[in-house]
Image: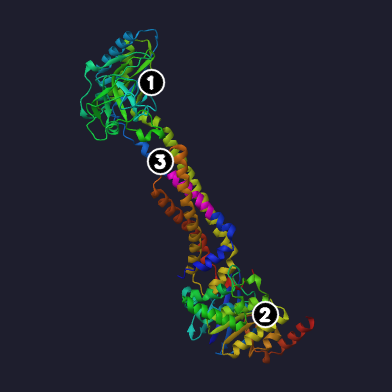
Amino acid sequence: MHIQIRPILAALRRHKAGTLLIALQIALTLAIVCNALFIIHQRLANLSAASGVDEANVFVIANMWADLDRSTEQVDAQVRADLLALRQLPAVRNATPASGYPLRGGGWDNFVTMTPEQVKPTTDAAVYTGDEHFLDTLGLKLVAGRNFRPDEVMVMGTQQAITPPTAIVSQALADRLFPDGNALGKSFYAMGTAPSTIVGIVDPLHRQGVDQWSNGYAGQALIWPLRADDERGIYYIVRAKPGQLADAMREAPKALYAQNRLRIIDPVDGIQDYATIRHKVYDRDRGMAILMSVISVVLLAITAAGIVGLTSFWVGQRRKQIGVRRALGARQRDILAYFLTENFLISATGVVLGAVLAVAFNLWTVTRFEMSHMSMAYVGIGVVALLLLGQGAVLAPALRASRVSPVEATRSV
Amino acid sequence: MLKMTHLSKVYRTEVVETYALRDFNIDVKEGEFVAVTGPSGSGKTTFLTIAGLLETFSGGEYHLDGIEVSNLNDNARSKIRNEKIGFIFQAFNLIPDLNVFDNIEVPLRYRGMKAAERKQRIMDSLERVGLASRAKHYPAELSGGQQQRVAIARALAGSPRLLLADEPTGNLDTQMARGVMELLEDIHREGATIVMVTHDPELAARAQRNVHIIDGQVVDLSEDPRFHTVHVAEEAHG
C-alpha cells in the first residue's frame, strides 16, 4: 500500500471549506464528548458512593406533629415513647431520633473551626443528631473510641442552639481536622464558643447533601448526642432485623399511630427505605449522566454522518479521478488507503484542535462551576474514539471508491 | 508486443447480448505506431480499454509483452498497467487538485519508486514535452495542448513498453493537435510502441500502420472497397 500524505494534503488544500468544516465538527465533538464522558463518569461514581449506612435494612420515618403547641418536654416524652415502641417491634433491631440522615439530599451543615476565635473555618461538616442508638441503628462502623453513653444525650428544643461537649466524627472529618492522627480526645468548634470533644470515629459516613460542590467534603460529618425535639416534627431512623425490612416498614407507622394519633406520616413518602432514598437523591446525577450520554451519542452520530456524507460526496465527485488513478496503476487497496489516509489527516487535525478545546472547556467549568479537573485519560479516550469513528465512518464510502473500475477513466464524464 | 487472438467482448443484460468485439485479431509489433480507426460504436474504445487492461474480455486470448493476461487478478493487472502501459486520454485526465509535478508523480508513487528517482523522471519527462517550467502549475492554469503534453509526460515518466492513446487530439484545436501529434511521432522515432485510437483520417495517416474496426472486427481496408466509398461519402458530407 502506498500512503501518499503530501499529495493528499495538497489536494485537501484545494477543498478547504469541506475539510475545515469536518475537522471543526470533529474538534467540537471531541471537546464536548470528553467533558461529557468526564461528567458521566463522575455522576456514575456518585451513584455508588458509600453512605456508611446498612442500606439493606434501614428505613426512615418522617414524622410530623399535628399538635404544635406542646412544650419541648412534652415532645421529648413523646419521642422517647415512640422510640420505645419502635424498638419493641419484633421486626425491628433498633431505632434512633434524628434531624437528618445520610443521602437525604441536604440538611444541617456547620463550619468547623479549631478555636472559638477563628474567623476562617477549617472546614465544613454535615451535622447529625441522635441518641446512643444512632450508630447501631444506621449500622455505622466505629473505628476508634466509643459510642455515646445514654447520660450524654441532651435534649434540644425548637430553635435552641446546644453544643454538646462530646461528638463522634467521621474518619474523613477527623483526618481533615487532625491530619497527624490522634483525633480522639481532641476538641473542635462547630457552633459558637463551646468545644466538642471527639469520643469516637466512624468510617464511612456520607453527608446529607450530594451536590457537586460538596463532593470534596462528601465524607465529612459529625454526630452530636442530641434528641432534637423540634415541635414541628422529627425523623425516626429504624433498622430492621435482617430480611424483615418490609415487615418493619409496615408495622412501624401502626406502632407510632397506636402511641399517638396526632401525627402525620405521609402515606407516599413518609416512610422510605434506603433504596428509595438513594434513588431519589441521585436522580439528578442519573438524569445528567443519561442526558450527557444521549448528547454524546447524538454528536458522534452526527459527526459520523458528516464524514460519511462528505466522503460519499467526494467519492462521487472524484469517480473519474479514481478511475484515472486505477488506470495509472493504483490497486483497490491503494484507493482505500487514499480515502482512509485523507480522513485520518482531517480527523487528526480535528482531534488536535478538539483536545485543546476539551481542556480549555474543562478549565472554564472548573473556574466557572467549581467542577473538578478532567484527567487527560478522557481526552485520550476521546481522541482514540473519534479517530476510530472517523475511520469507521469513511470505510463504506472508501470501499465504494476502491471498487470504481479503471475503465471509468475513459468515460466522458 | 500486443497480440489479441479471437478475442471477444460481450455486454450482457437479462434480455440481450451485445458483442462489442467479435473474433477480434490484432498483432502490434514492438516499435510500431498503429492507428486504430473506425466509426463511432465500432468498438475502438472497447479495444483500447481491453488493451490497456482497464476492462476484462469475454473470450479469446490477449498477450501483452509476452504475458497472457486473461487470468490475472486485479492486483497483477494494476501492476502491468502501472509498469508496462502509458495512457494518453482524449480528455487528458489530469487530476485537477494536483499540480503538474504531482500529477506526473501519481503512477510513479504507485510503483513504490524512491523520491529522488521520481523527481528525476518527472523533470526528464517534463523536459521531454517542453513544460519543465510549469511543474508547479495546476491543470486549470494550462492550455489544452499543454495539459495533453503533461498527460504525455505522465505516460512517459514510467518508461512504459506500450503507449495507448485514445483520441489524443480530440479536444484540441488544429495547431495544438499538430504539436501533440509531432510529439507522439518523436516519441515513436525514439523507439516507443504506440497504439492510437482515432477517427481522424488525417491523424491516422501519420501512423505507420492503420487498423480499421467495423462492428467489433478488424477489417482490411485494402480488401474492402466499400469502406473507401463510405469514407469518401462521409468526407463529402462533412
Determine if the magenta segment contains residue A236.
Answer: no
Dot 1 and dot 2 residues touching (CB under 8 Å): no
Q: Position of residue A333 (x, y in %)?
A: 47, 68
Determine contact: label 3, label 2, CB under 8 Å.
no
Residue labelled with disc 1 = A270
Q: Residue at x 55, y 82 (%)?
A: B124
Residue lying at the far bottom of the rendered structure: B222
SS at circle 3: loop
Residue drawn at (47%, 51%) of the image: A356
Q: Counting other residues with Cα less than 10 Å from the Cα at mark 2, is it few (<14), some (14-19), or many (20 or more)?
A: many
Q: Is residue A174 above or below residue B28?
A: above
Given residues B114 and A338, the one toward you in this image is B114
> Can you name the residue that lies furthest to the front here?
A117
- Helix, strand or loop under label 1: loop
Tell me the residue that label 3 is attached to: A372
Which residue: 58% across, 57% down? A18
Part of the protein shown in magenta: A23-37
